[in-house]
Image (cartoon, helix red, strand yellow):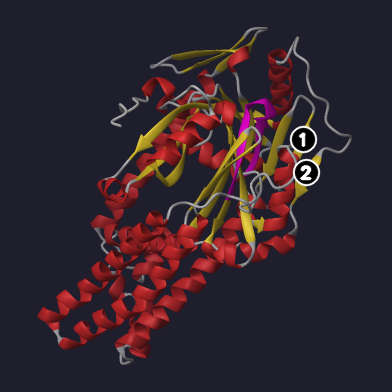
């Protein structure tokens, strides 16, 4: 870092640079010391009924998990681990509280030790219980590199460009380096400083979009290289993936409560989708979002094929075809929201134009004229995405405009109902019905139903669960 700072500053240095680099070096020593102390003081023991982990020297921690409560045993390896043939074994009891982030982890054991320890834990946990036997192959899906075309179709790459730019600016500022004084920036200023503002904004947007697509593609390769979804003996779905950091996530089929098909706008236009598991035992919400993926962004037909095999209930479980439509009041609500956002966004340049210049007022008016049809079109798309249906023992629900989500949730996995109404929904006579469950996100919503539809759906899906909380109005006839 010292050599890099000299290269950036052209060989000049000052006290601020030395202090900053010294602070970073001391931080490195402290973190390394804590890691070494944790490594030297970690002990673990596996018995027939418990897994115990003891760590710490000054602040000791002794944790114990009953074998019967273990829900997941995952194996991950970052690039440094892979360089030395090591890995990390994570044991999850399925706790969804904030303490789940501190689940038991053995960091820095060999891959062979991790695989054998995982086998022993699963064998002890399932002892005395009938274990399903997988097919001879058991592979449900493998990576097809033609799917790489879906890599750029996410918005996270653009966000990563802004995050990287902000981090670089902050680091240079800490080193007392003004980014505007760098030679590269001055050269760009000399080349493009005289172009019109609108052209500069357009060019910057194109550059950011291209960099974002490159970043998204690189992220796709890192996350999903070597992907394989396999059904193994014991009724376990195992997902292996990762290029630099390898991950192996196991999901027990008996804890699988449903599936979620996610179709963001760019991916949907390319007839792609991503399949997630709705399962218990994947930790808190943050852990669940990191571990629930059954497929990468893939062709929609492939996602539907995997869904039919992951939950063998027959094809078409999470298809939108046949879903019941929602009342027209839901469409009016979305159109009103689109018009409101169009006005609010256009009002910003118009308001600044009254102070800075007429050209901003014209820009605001043009922005509003363009936004109204675009956002109204998304409002219609959001309304057509709404739908729900009871398919056998599953409640199927769909919603979303920018990211359409279709969820199939087992009805016997619903442990409660949540009925909510915003002031705007009350005015339109609508409610949102939330199905609470111990799996996945914890609650899945059926948006903008009439009050009668919501209560009838809840009572039909899980008879008797909502009945104690319903007060029937007296007959006034």
The mark that comes first in sequence, 2 or 1, is 2
Label 2 belongs to which residue?
A: 140
Q: Residue at x 58, y 62 (%)?
A: 267
Q: Which residue is most to the right?
A: 136
Residue 34 appearing in the image: yes
Label 1 belongs to which residue?
A: 231
On screen, residue 256 versus residue 134, left or right, reads left
Depth check, front residue: 299 or 182: 299
CA–CA distance between discs 2 and 1? Answer: 7 Å
Q: Residue at x 72, y 15 (%)?
A: 126
Q: Quadrant of residue 33?
A: top left
Asked whether disc 2 touches disc 1, contact meaning CB atoms under 8 Å apart, the reply is yes
Depth check, front residue: 255 or 242: 255
**Residues in magenta, as a range:** 245-261
| 177 in relation to 242, above or below | below
| 208 in relation to 201, above or below | above
Depth check, front residue: 181 or 142: 142
* Quarter the N terminus occupies: bottom left
Q: Residue at x 67, y 57 (%)?
A: 300
Residue 152 appearing in the image: no
Near mark 1 (Cα within 10 A), the count class, few <14, some 14-19 or many ≥20, is many
Location of residue 378 in the rendering, given as x and y in whole percent from the top left corner: 44, 66
On screen, residue 224 versus residue 206, left or right, reads right
Q: Quadrant of residue 69?
A: top right
256 magenta-colored: yes
| 468 in relation to 267, above or below | above
Near mark 2 (Cα within 10 A), the count class, few <14, some 14-19 or many ≥20, is some
Location of residue 102 in the rendering, given as x and y in whole percent from the top left corner: 46, 26
Location of residue 49 in the rendering, given as x and y in whole percent from the top left corner: 64, 7
274 magenta-colored: no
| 348 in relation to 67, above or below | below
């Amino acid at each position: 870092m010292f050599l890099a700072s000299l290269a950036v500053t052209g060989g000049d240095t000052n006290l601020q640079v030395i202090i900053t680099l010294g602070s970073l070096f001391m931080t490195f020593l402290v973190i390394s010391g804590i890691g070494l102390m944790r490594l030297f003081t970690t002990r673990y023991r596996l018995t027939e009924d418990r897994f115990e982990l003891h760590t710490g020297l000054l602040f000791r921690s002794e944790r114990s998990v009953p074998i019967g409560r273990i829900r997941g045993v995952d194996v991950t390896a970052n690039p440094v681990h892979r360089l030395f043939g090591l890995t990390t074994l994570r044991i999850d009891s399925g706790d969804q509280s904030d303490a789940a982030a501190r689940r038991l982890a053995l960091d820095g054991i060999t891959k062979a030790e991790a695989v054998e320890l995982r086998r022993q834990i699963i064998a002890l946990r399932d002892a005395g219980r009938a274990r399903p036997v997988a097919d001879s192959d058991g592979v449900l899906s493998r990576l097809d590199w033609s799917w790489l075309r879906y890599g750029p179709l996410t918005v996270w790459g653009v966000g990563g460009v802004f995050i990287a730019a902000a981090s670089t600016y902050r680091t240079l500022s800490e080193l007392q380096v003004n980014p505007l004084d760098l030679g590269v920036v001055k050269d760009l200023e000399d080349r493009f400083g005289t172009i019109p503002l609108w052209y500069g904004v357009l060019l910057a947007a194109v550059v950011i979009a291209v960099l974002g697509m490159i970043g998204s593609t690189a992220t796709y390769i890192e996350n999903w290289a070597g992907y394989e979804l396999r059904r193994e003996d014991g009724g376990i779905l195992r997902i292996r993936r990762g290029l630099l950091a390898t991950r192996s996530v196991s999901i027990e089929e008996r804890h699988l409560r449903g599936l979620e098909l996610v179709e963001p706008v760019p991916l949907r236009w390319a007839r792609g989708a991503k399949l997630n598991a709705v399962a218990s035992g994947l930790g808190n919400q943050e852990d669940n979002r990191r571990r629930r993926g059954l497929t990468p962004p893939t062709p929609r037909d492939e996602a539907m094929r995997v869904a039919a095999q992951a939950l063998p209930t027959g094809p078409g479980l999470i298809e939108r075809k046949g879903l019941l439509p929602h009342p027209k009041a839901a469409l009016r609500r979305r159109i009103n929201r689109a018009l409101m956002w169009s006005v609010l966004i256009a009002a910003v340049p118009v308001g600044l134009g009254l102070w800075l210049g007429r050209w901003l007022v014209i820009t605001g008016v043009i922005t509003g004229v363009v936004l109204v049809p675009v956002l109204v079109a998304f409002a219609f798309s959001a309304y057509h995405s709404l739908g729900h249906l009871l398919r056998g023992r599953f409640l199927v629900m769909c919603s979303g405009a920018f990211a359409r989500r279709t969820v199939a949730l087992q009805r016997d996995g619903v442990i409660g109902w949540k009925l909510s109404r915003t002031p705007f929904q009350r005015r339109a006579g609508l409610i949102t019905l939330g199905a609470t469950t111990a799996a996945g996100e914890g609650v899945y919503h059926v948006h903008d139903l009439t009050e009668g539809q919501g209560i009838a759906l809840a009572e039909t899906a899980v008879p008797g669960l909502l009945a104690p909380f319903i007060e029937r109005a007296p007959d006034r006839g």
